[in-house]
Amino acid sequence: AQSVSQHNHHVILSEAASLELGCNYSYGGTVNLFWYVQYPGQHLQLLLKYFSGDPLVKGIKGFEAEFIKSKFSFNLRKPSVQWSDTAEYFCAAMIYNQGGKLIFGQGTELSVKP
Amino acid sequence: DAGVIQSPRHEVTEMGQEVTLRCKPISGHNSLFWYRQTMMRGLELLIYFNNNVPIDDSGMPEDRFSAKMPNASFSTLKIQPSEPRDSAVYFCASSPPGLAGTNEQFFGPGTRLTVL
């Protein structure tokens, strides 16, 4: 069965530290990949997405992610985090031609200390 | 654009009562998704519709859950009878028409359900 795994359940960083959140998916065919962010008490918002083309994808708020097909990975990065980045981050995969169904990872809670 | 609208935002009910959650997708979107979010299970897809037709309801936990989409601008998720383990945040999301499996989903603010 298709699945998405996020390696870290909770990450704690100080402001200005660099961030990398791991995401792996299990599916051998074409997938579209997403990172969503959920700020405390709010709904999910799209950070970035990968459909095809350049495997390095840039999103909002200085986030980027790299798709590495050989590793089935789509890790999220940010060179310097801010306190306002405190949120939960979800990686998701959409299997091509399965009607837009999203499979979410378990989520990673990021806490940034000021 | 108002985005995806969900109501109510908070619902507190007693075990055994019927609960109805409502969703209005973004105008022009033709796919609608219902998700449940809990601490234990994370985000789970319950059911999704395409052009008002249910496509995959394999995530619906049991017969107590039902969902309808009578038209392109309205969907309901009903739980009858409700149980304490149904307590969760229920999100609705919609996506625009396009090549299947390529479109971003836009999420609503969620309904926080508490069943006592």
Image (spheres, coloured by chain):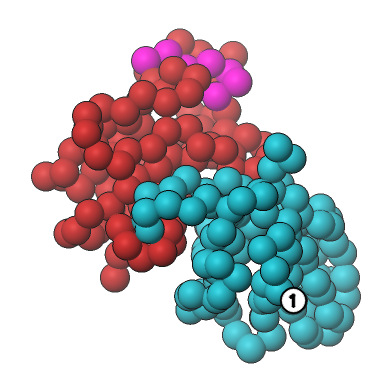
Q: Chain of mark 1?
A: B
Q: Residue at x 66, y 63 (%)?
A: B72
Percent position of residue B38, x then y: 61, 59
Extreme bottom residue here? B63
Can residue B46 be seen here? The reply is no
- Looking at this view, name the residue that lies furthest to the left: A70
Q: Residue at x 36, y 65 (%)?
A: A98
**Quadrant holding the C terminus of chain A:** top right
Which image quarter holds the N terminus of chain A? bottom left
Q: Residues within 10 Å of mark 1 (few under 14, many from 20)?
A: some
Res A64 → quadrant: top left
Q: What's under tag 1, amino acid-wise? A: Lys
The residue lying at 11 percent from left, 45 percent from top is A70
Of residues A53 and A42, which is closer to you in this image? A53
**Residue position marked by numbered label 1 in the rendering:** B78
Q: Position of residue A21 (x, y in %)?
A: 36, 34
Chain B: colour as depicted: cyan
Looking at the picture, tell me which residue is in the foreground, A84 or B29. Answer: B29
Query: Which contiguous range is marked in magenta?
Result: A79-85
